[in-house]
Amino acid sequence: MTVKTKTFRIFGLVLFCALILTIAESARPEEGMWTLDNPPLKLWKEKYGFTPPAGWLDHIRQASVRFNDGGSGSFVSPNGLVLTNHHVALGQLQKMSTDKKDYVKDGYLAKTRAQEIKCADLELNVLVSTENVTDRVLAAVKKAPDEKKALEARRAEIAKIEKESLDATGFRSNVVTLYSGGEYWLYRYKKYTDVRLVFAPENQIAFFGGDPDNFTYPRYDIDFTLFRVYENDKPVASTHFLKWNVKGAAENDLVFVSGHPGSTDRMQTLAQLELQRDYMYPWYFKLINRRLDVLRRYSARGAEQARQAMDQIFGLENSFKALTGEYNGLMDKALMDKKRKEEADFRGLIDKNADWKKAYGKAWDDIAKAQREYAGFFKQAMYQTMRTQLPGFANQIVKYVAEVKKPDGERLPGYHDSELDELKFYLFSPAPIYPELEQALLADGLQSSLEELGPNDPFIKIALGGKSPAEAAKDLVTKTKLIDPAVRKSLLEGGEAAVAASQDPLIVLARALDPMSRAMRKRLENTVESVESSAGEKIGKARFAAYGKEASPDATFTLRLSFGAVKGYPMNGTKAPYKTLLYGLYERFYAFDKKPPFDLPPIYVERKAKLDLLTPVNFVCACDIIGGNSGSPVINRDGDIVGLIFDGNIESLVGRYVYNEENNRAVAVHTAIMTETLRKLYDAAPLADELEGKGPRAIR
Amino acid sequence: MTVKTKTFRIFGLVLFCALILTIAESARPEEGMWTLDNPPLKLWKEKYGFTPPAGWLDHIRQASVRFNDGGSGSFVSPNGLVLTNHHVALGQLQKMSTDKKDYVKDGYLAKTRAQEIKCADLELNVLVSTENVTDRVLAAVKKAPDEKKALEARRAEIAKIEKESLDATGFRSNVVTLYSGGEYWLYRYKKYTDVRLVFAPENQIAFFGGDPDNFTYPRYDIDFTLFRVYENDKPVASTHFLKWNVKGAAENDLVFVSGHPGSTDRMQTLAQLELQRDYMYPWYFKLINRRLDVLRRYSARGAEQARQAMDQIFGLENSFKALTGEYNGLMDKALMDKKRKEEADFRGLIDKNADWKKAYGKAWDDIAKAQREYAGFFKQAMYQTMRTQLPGFANQIVKYVAEVKKPDGERLPGYHDSELDELKFYLFSPAPIYPELEQALLADGLQSSLEELGPNDPFIKIALGGKSPAEAAKDLVTKTKLIDPAVRKSLLEGGEAAVAASQDPLIVLARALDPMSRAMRKRLENTVESVESSAGEKIGKARFAAYGKEASPDATFTLRLSFGAVKGYPMNGTKAPYKTLLYGLYERFYAFDKKPPFDLPPIYVERKAKLDLLTPVNFVCACDIIGGNSGSPVINRDGDIVGLIFDGNIESLVGRYVYNEENNRAVAVHTAIMTETLRKLYDAAPLADELEGKGPRAIR
């Protein structure tokens, strides 16, 4: 469950009927993904008698790590050891792998520092500081005569703030929009790009139960991986690390989750939710199913092909299951009725106050109108593009050389000065690209665009150039040189002249499509985004006016702290326990007659007698999380790490729109199982010692 | 899950949404509780290549046992050993228990035949023969001028058939109404009343997981009990017994369930379902919740009180969970829409044929009208009565002495010659009655009638006689002598004179209420039952005319054969395995930190090392069952017993109205766990040997 990724299963539907019964009654006290500047201190104190000691929040912030390709982690030793999920590390493990050595399937243990393997393109961030820049952004917007200009002004000011901060501090600087634009904050990050693999278990134990068990509980996944962060070829001195607590948390213990939830839509207007429901989700499902079909057929060609496609298949299955849960929420009449009532109440409150009504009253209707506009060109926006890696590179190169010549404030999103390092990091990544896989995906992508848009669509005419989708894809992928990162680099560095002169077929095509894609971008901005942004800002302010800052803002893939008790929940007619044990892992293995995806790596059978079957494997807590929180530490009152978030239960999928304390649970790997398996299965006692703080790591 | 008994859990709701998606697609090939005269031979052959060898069906029939207080069982040795569920045996175990010895909690093993304990009032039946008497019943009804007379004529003819058969054969003889009156069959049973307890495990392992796990799966209940049937103080020679197969069934194996499903409502009209939904179920819930409240308060008084109330609490919690599942089906719009469409299609087919239309066309409207009538006096019918044991005895005694004087055909249901033995068996039962418990239940029952009917209702005036409900109940229960079975017997044998002269306050009250209860009985018969019966018969014939005998009839607590594959199913977002093992039992025990209802009897901890944790505990099959099937054997193609039905999963509760092969599963105890625990935990190797056919039982 990462932020990039997010399966259809009949039972997805289930939760929503169940939920509705209790939404109204629940006081939702465990709800919230809180920014560290506004934690619910009063609630913690009243409900749990907990007041964080001085420095507690700062310590957790500095120990928390963002995985820039989507996910979270934490420092767990003073020598730069970072703990995250195996599925967060999956992309990197795959990039290290070849047809000779499969780090995903077989796992890896670096027995010495020298054996720690550098990742191709992994960037980690640690939040250094946050600063409220709302006044500055709003002042810049205030002068704009209309919404379009306001959007431009806002972007320009944000880019300026980011650039200034980057220049002044050298830190990665991002302005974050909170409370639908009610607040703007500048977040500065220390950036690490030399990240090395220390330990990964076999994929089969990290993802035991596969797609069926994904997003469910009771669960038995030992989903962890350890990286080490280096600077100047030495492990960083991570003074702010989380102390390893092998006992874990007891039932009903208060725990916290510090991580980077990707996005929630709890503050969206009803009109936005309806557009999601009626246009976006059906399209997601269509897209994902088609792509999965291509990937599975590709996988069936052989073991190497299966290895190449695995990460994408995992990601898409994961997405499909999660999206289904969310979609079911939107399809649920009672949930939507509740949202409708909340919105009506909110608007009623605003309309009662003449000042508020004047300032904010029209915002909901503006957003609704923008949604209707978007519905009118949704199909073109979705299908006049190629969603595969190589055409994506070509498009970025063509745009880059043109954008960087403009003043920073006028550039397209993604091409601001503060964003260029990150763009180049991915564009120049040495990670392998598999041309045959790329070709299969591109051919089907073009085919679906042709089916949806028809042969006379201008995009289709240019993209296919009279060929069939399969021919066009073959031509493009076999003739392009963009697979080589050096070629991408030299084009980028050659600037507009080099790009204009390039005969690379993908660059030629990207040039031809550029005006159309820019026009679409503009249309989306002018008719939808600018309105949503401006009206969202008004609604954000209206919310402050009516309710204060009582709720946490929607998730933004920035650092948040969730809290809640470790506890079981009512599940499918019975109860789910708060924890699972190794007994249950073997139950599931044998109950399914060892058949995949319930098979185990051989070492789990060979060395079973060494294991204490009472060792906890996974546990659940009521902390409010969502995709992006994968890899987040679970922390107790003392600031110790007691677990590692890796999933939410099926009942939590509706959490994008509504949190229900009764059965919304975050699922974590227990600290005890990680050291138990390191010591008894993997002969990695020194690493377990490092985690448990038993002196420095013995082997160097 | 017995037929008498039938809980609210938010997740009950779940199944229905899920089900609807697949109802339309499912061909429902595993559906059906088939009478042994009409098994789906063609389907078995086509789908499984199975044709039962000569004598196979007869053998299974003769090995199958009906527990007359609700439940099923089978002969499993040539020496009269009968296997059923612990929860079917529960009532008898409780009746044997005293404050000194608790057979329910502690279990029991008879180490010699002499130690086998006779049950207070357990009657077992074995089906000897069946005979189609449809023509005879219909001929008797044909001459009746109206529905009321038709009902009387039908009852009289049925009573006559039963009496003739009883007199001629000595067998318990019951006429069964099948296909809503489309067919009438005479079922003759060999009756056994000397049934002795051989082995029962501790309740905590039979009902591991308690109410939360009830009606759910994966499950870990070793829910079995062994009785031995005696005649003339000797074990019966049960030549037709099922051979014990300790290997059990493999995944996807075809298996059969032979048992006595209580009732289903798959053939009811929409109007009947709506009455159930809008009147019956809400009333059930109110009644059960109130009674559970009384029982729980009574239990809280002390350990002995808790022991006394336990069987009733189990039964009511069981009912509540099951009824909730059913009610959710009725509340589901999509399911009701499907029923509506089916009915419209069926009626359309009938109306197209002029003969059919004339004969059957009006039946649905007649039933609908009767439901509206019933709704008009439903509350009085439900509350003008006392639903506890002692007033029930008094009412039966008063009615008995009057009814037996009438010609058999004119008597009230329950008082026909063929039914008198059974009535007396229960009326004279020496099983203990707990006066304080009785008083608490009666007081609350009278209180609820007072609340619902008001102080001026004639029933209330007579029943309370100016006292408060608590005073009235105290007076009645403390002064009555009916607690003594000898008193009940002497009153019955004393006839009308003895009953008229009795000053026992409960008899006095029953006499006073008798005219009112008879009037209510008549009203129900005349306005509802006669119409349902007559119209139901028409619909049954119409169904034959339109569709033939393709579907099995609704369950009637008579012998049926279900079939299906042993297989897992999609569950709450993931998959449920087809079997569970001892590993999982210990997982659940330790995951809940050994807390009730997930605690284990001490022997399961002390002797754990002796057990093979790979032993299967429970398994599921797609066989179509319902309450009453508890204790049914699961039989393979060879006629061996491979398991013991004890429950359905939560997804099967909607099965009262619709069967869904995708996730409707019967849950069974695996044969292996029964002999494994007998041998390794209970030192009962001779009994395990008897089951496994390893020579006659060693200890005598």
Image (cartoon, coloured by chain):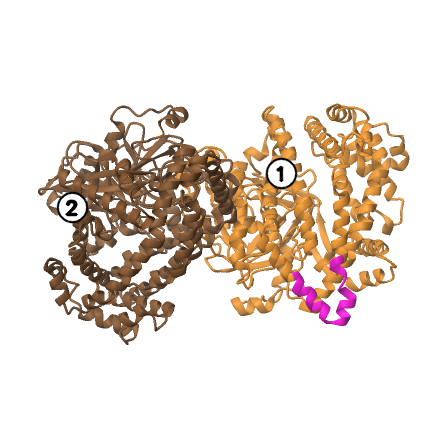
Chain colours: A brown, B orange
| Quadrant assignment for the N terminus of chain B | top right
Find residue B198 and report its horizontal and vertical position in percent.
59, 41
**B427 relative position to B649: left or right:** right
In the structure shown, which secondary structural element does the residue marked by tag 2 occupy?
Answer: loop
In the structure shown, which secondary structural element does the residue marked by tag 1 occupy?
Answer: helix
| B686 or B458, nearer to the observer | B458
The answer to whether residue A182 is visible is: yes
Q: What residue is shown at x 84% (from left), y 42% (from top)?
A: B519
Find residue A499 and report its horizontal and vertical position in percent.
14, 63
Q: Residues within 10 Å of mark 1 (few under 14, many from 20)?
A: many
Q: Which residue is mark 2?
A: A193
| B174 or A226, nearer to the observer | A226
- Which secondary structure is most common in the magenta stretch? helix
Find residue B212 and report its horizontal and vertical position in percent.
52, 39
Q: Quadrant of residue A652?
A: top left
**What residue type is disc 2 on?**
Thr
- Residue ranking furthest to the right: B497
Q: Chain of mark 1?
A: B
Q: Chain of mark 2?
A: A
Q: CA distance from mark 2 to mark 1?
A: 63 Å
| Quadrant assignment for the C terminus of chain B | top right
**Residue B691 vertical placement versus B39 (above, below):** above
Find residue B696 and report its horizontal and vertical position in percent.
56, 49
**B523 relative position to A545: left or right:** right
Q: Which stretch appears magenta? A: B343-365
| B117 or B14, nearer to the observer | B14
Q: Is residue A454 magenta?
A: no
Q: Which residue is mark 1?
A: B316
